[in-house]
């Protein structure tokens, strides 16, 4: 028998777990940094105003908030170490879209009771709480935007939203993206079709009238302004991976044909790793090579956890599980993640040491103008001799 419905309001939860001014500032800085990272390609000369390569990294899903926080602390240190080269954001995924059925994430089932009646009210609260604690570390948060009813409880803590492969074609999700106060990435479809993500970014850029939920939990007739800060995430699909240089060029061309700015992120997991987490470093290394050679890739996504692999949910709930191991898709270990981050940072450095000697002779004044347009912090000086 269904239990008695409880009334929930985003305002009630936000009042019990409020953001401080410092957290609000840090979330806004994360949103701005994402915007800048997407707007212009990683510069060929070091430029302090560009935040570097976007790296969205973290567990496939959060099921144990203590392990999630331990991961966040490690990642916050890495984010500091690579500041200026990598813009690191943590995947704090609290909802999981399932191909058929399965655990739907911390929001829906915080006690891992799968199939039995779960405590969604507690799920919302522990999900907001871990996001708040991660944001307090100064780490930008990225999550999949799945339920339109969950988003108002956590939106103020997000620096970026992702619409997953199973919902990129959904009008509801495109409407939500059109109203989001942050950049939103659309994944290609599960079968590998990129055109649906391109359709989505065009739809999300437009204003929409749609039903939404306000802070008091009431349905409202809402009007969105349209979101120009969207991007495509290439995640591969059932027809194989789509991260090769050829795939990147095809995607760039498709975006240009759709009159969209080229903003591409490669997901090293899912279809691109052929669902084998151990392949993610190989995908990341390939992407790193492309980045050092100047490819128009704004960022990468990685599924990573404290310990490698995955495990099935045990009937004993959290007590029956190995610490720091995913209960959804397999993840690379923290040690492997450190190696991948170093490789990505090295690719940004390599891109920025490409010799700038022009192959043809151009007048100094015109070269100076072009360079200053591309890199406002650079000045060209004439050398004698
Ligand atoms: O990223 C996670 C999974 O790929 C996604 O939730 C689908 O999982 P499933 O096919 O195991 O249901
Ligand atoms: C579900 C996910 O990805 P996708 O939508 O690409 O399957 C994910 O990144 O957790």
Image: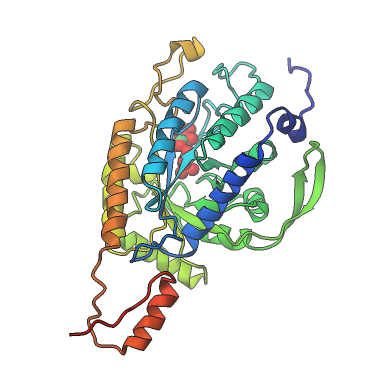
- Please determine whether, in this image, residue 109 is positioned above or below residue 45: above
| Position of residue 306 in the picture relative to residue 22 (left or right) | left
| Position of residue 92 in the picture relative to residue 239 (left or right) | right
- Of residues 117 and 343, the one nearer the viewer is 343
User: Measured from the top left, where is residue 384 in percent x and y?
Assistant: 22, 84
User: Measured from the top left, where is residue 348 in percent x and y?
Assistant: 32, 56
- Which residue is at 53% across, 25% downward? 103
Determine which quarter of the picture holds residue 268.
top left
Is residue 168 shown to the viewer in this render?
Answer: no
Is residue 345 shown to the viewer in this render?
Answer: yes
- Which residue is at 55% across, 41% downward? 144
Determine which quarter of the picture holds residue 121.
top right
- Which residue is at 81% across, 36% downward? 216
Q: Quadrant of the C terminus?
A: bottom left
- Which residue is at 64% across, 52% downward? 181
User: Measured from the top left, where is residue 190 in percent x and y?
Assistant: 46, 46
- Please determine whether, in this image, residue 318 is positioned above or below residue 299: above
User: Measured from the top left, where is residue 239 in percent x and y?
Assistant: 36, 50
């Amino acid at each position: 028998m269904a239990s008695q419905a409880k009334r929930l309001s985003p305002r009630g939860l936000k009042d019990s777990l409020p953001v401080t001014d410092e957290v609000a500032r840090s979330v806004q800085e994360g949103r701005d940094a994402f915007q800048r990272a997407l707007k212009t390609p990683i510069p060929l000369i070091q430029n302090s105003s560009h935040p570097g390569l976007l790296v969205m990294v973290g567990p496939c899903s959060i099921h144990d908030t203590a392990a999630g926080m331990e991961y966040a602390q490690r990642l916050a240190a890495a984010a500091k170490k690579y500041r200026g080269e990598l813009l690191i954001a943590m995947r704090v995924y609290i909802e999981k879209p399932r191909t058929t059925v399965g655990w739907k994430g911390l929001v829906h089932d915080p006690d891992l009771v799968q199939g039995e009646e779960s405590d969604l009210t507690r799920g919302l609260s522990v999900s907001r709480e871990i996001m708040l604690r991660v944001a307090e570390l100064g780490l930008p948060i990225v999550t999949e935007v799945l339920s339109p009813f969950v988003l108002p409880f956590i939106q103020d803590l997000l620096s970026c939203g992702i619409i997953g492969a199973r919902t990129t074609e959904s009008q509801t999700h495109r409407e939500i993206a059109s109203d989001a106060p942050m950049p939103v990435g659309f994944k290609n479809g599960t079968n590998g079709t990129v055109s649906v993500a391109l359709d989505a970014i065009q739809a999300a850029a437009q204003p929409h009238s749609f039903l939404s939920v306000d802070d008091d939990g009431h349905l409202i007739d809402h009007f969105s302004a349209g979101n120009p800060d969207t991007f495509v995430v290439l995640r591969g699909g059932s027809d194989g991976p789509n991260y090769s240089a050829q795939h990147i060029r095809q995607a760039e061309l498709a975006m240009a044909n759709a009159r969209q700015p080229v903003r591409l992120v490669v997901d090293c997991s899912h279809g691109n790793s052929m669902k084998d987490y151990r392949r993610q470093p190989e995908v990341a290394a390939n992407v790193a090579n492309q980045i050092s050679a100047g490819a128009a890739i704004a960022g990468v996504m990685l599924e990573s956890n404290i310990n490698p692999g995955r495990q099935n949910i045990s009937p004993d709930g959290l007590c029956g599980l190995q610490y720091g191991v995913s209960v959804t898709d397999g993840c690379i270990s923290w040690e492997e993640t450190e190696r991948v981050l170093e490789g990505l940072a090295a690719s940004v450095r390599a891109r920025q040491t490409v010799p700038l000697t022009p192959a043809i002779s151009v007048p100094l004044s015109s070269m100076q103008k072009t360079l200053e347009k591309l890199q406002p912090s650079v000045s060209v000086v004439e050398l004698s001799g």
